[in-house]
Amino acid sequence: MDVTQDLDAVGLLCPLPVLKARKRLSQMATGEVLRIRADDPAAVIDIPHFCVESGHELVSSQDDGAVQVYLLRCR
């Protein structure tokens, strides 16, 4: 999958990862993919919930050590 943009949210606590993702996605075109790296324990709930509420597609989520990596497709 081609990642269009990266967002490093490591070290940021709720709600900053979601707020920064919202801002970045608002500047992206439909179909583009944003990769988010976060280590906030709340992100595992917040990011999927944000996708449901905003209509963006959560393509994948996986752990990379202590960091979670999310791929979101802009809608």
Image (cartoon, rainbow, N blue to C red):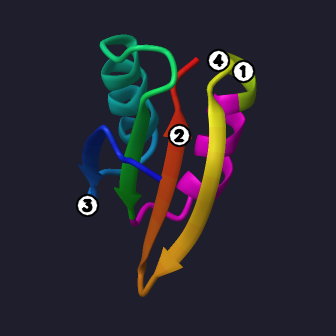
Would you name the residue on which mark 3 appears?
A: 11
Residue at x-position 31% and y-position 24%: 24
User: Could you tell which of marks 4 and 2 lies nearer the N-terminus?
Assistant: 4
Please tell me the numbered disc located at residue 39: none
Taking depth in this image into account, of 31 and 41 the one nearest to the observer is: 31
- Residue 64 location, quadrant: bottom left
Please say if the residues under marks 4 and 1 sit with CB atoms less than 8 Å apart. yes
Q: Position of residue 56 (x, y in %)?
A: 62, 25
Q: Residues within 10 Å of mark 1 (few under 14, many from 20)?
A: few
Q: Amino acid at mark 3?
A: Gly
- Magenta range is 39-51
Q: CA distance from mark 1 to mark 3?
A: 24 Å
Taking 11 as reference, is 13 above or below it?
above
Would you name the residue on which mark 1 appears?
A: 53
Would you name the residue on which mark 2 appears?
A: 72
Residue at x-position 35% and y-position 17%: 28
Q: CA distance from mark 2 to mark 1?
A: 13 Å
Identify the element where label 4 is drawn. Answer: helix
Q: Nearer the viewer, mark 4 or mark 2?
A: 2
Q: Position of residue 59 (x, y in %)?
A: 63, 48
